[in-house]
Amino acid sequence: MKKTERTYNLSDAVLLRYGNRIAEVIPEDFEAFKTFDTTFPDSYQADLKTSLASVMALKTDMVIVDEMAEKTQAVQEAMAACNSAFRTIKFFVNKAFPGNTAVHNQFGFNDIAKARRNHGTMLLFMGDFTKVTQSYRTALLEAGCSEGLLDSLPQLHQELQEAETAQELFKKERGLLTQQRVEKLNELYKLLTPVSEMAQIIYANDEARRARYSLPSPNASTPSSSNGADEVTDA
């Protein structure tokens, strides 16, 4: 198991705002930092901009959550379409085979309740339901069932399969995306920390400049933009 933890106790948004502010103001004070610490890298300003850009290029947790909701909605809509088709065809099964429990159960009358509660179960159900429905196609058509509805079942099954696959793939991707973002933000924080620390000494007698470079106060109640989800676990 691999854990990626935030090394900063700030919200992602606050850390980014602070980083952007430092990138804007440090050019005018860069020589002061170089004078204080002769090992302070000449590439610091470029490194900071690169770090900020790499974070901004990644999706925020809010965007990831919204995309996950979209995938979930697609599954729910596909489930609803399958259930609607079943309910309609069930009417004609009852009409064509009144009181015939054996035939009814071939169509899944005894399994639909479980299928409605789980998209994986519904996926298996629709595969069987499509095959059984086609085997009784003539009787259902004679009972008045729409040919178009019967022909739509393979497509409904496929759409549910695609929606379910997209959702499962995105669940795995979400962990990776969050991990990448935390790693990039940790790198940014590592770049910003020494500047804040040096500024406390360099500008000990200049309150305005000292405040300009001071790291924001920690927000213990919201350590990240992902509502406290400050670590990612990968199998």
Image (tube, rainbow, N blue to C red):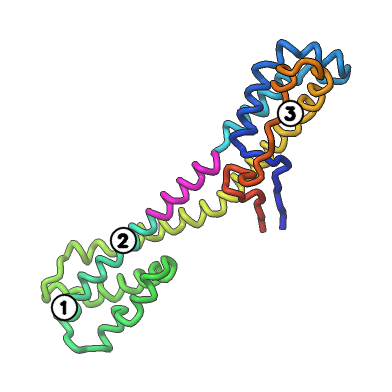
Q: Position of residue 177 (x, y in %)?
A: 59, 44
- From the viewer's perspective, is residue 96 above or below residue 7? below
Report the residue at 71% width, 22% height from top.
Answer: 211
Amino acid at the residue labelled 3: Leu
Report the residue at 67% width, 28% height from top.
Answer: 51
Q: Which residues are magenta?
A: 60-73
Q: Give the mark toward the camera: 1 or 2.
A: 2
The CA span between labels 2 and 3 is: 53 Å
Q: Which mark is residue 156?
A: 2
Which secondary structure, mark 3?
helix
Q: Position of residue 162 (x, y in %)?
A: 41, 56
Which secondary structure, mark 2?
helix
Quadrant of res 210: top right
Q: Give the mark toward the camera: 3 or 1.
A: 3
Q: Which residue is mark 3?
A: 192
Residue closest to the eye, 210 or 108: 210
- From the viewer's perspective, is residue 190 above or below residue 129? above
Q: Residues within 10 Å of mark 2 (few under 14, many from 20)?
A: many
Amino acid at the residue labelled 1: Ala
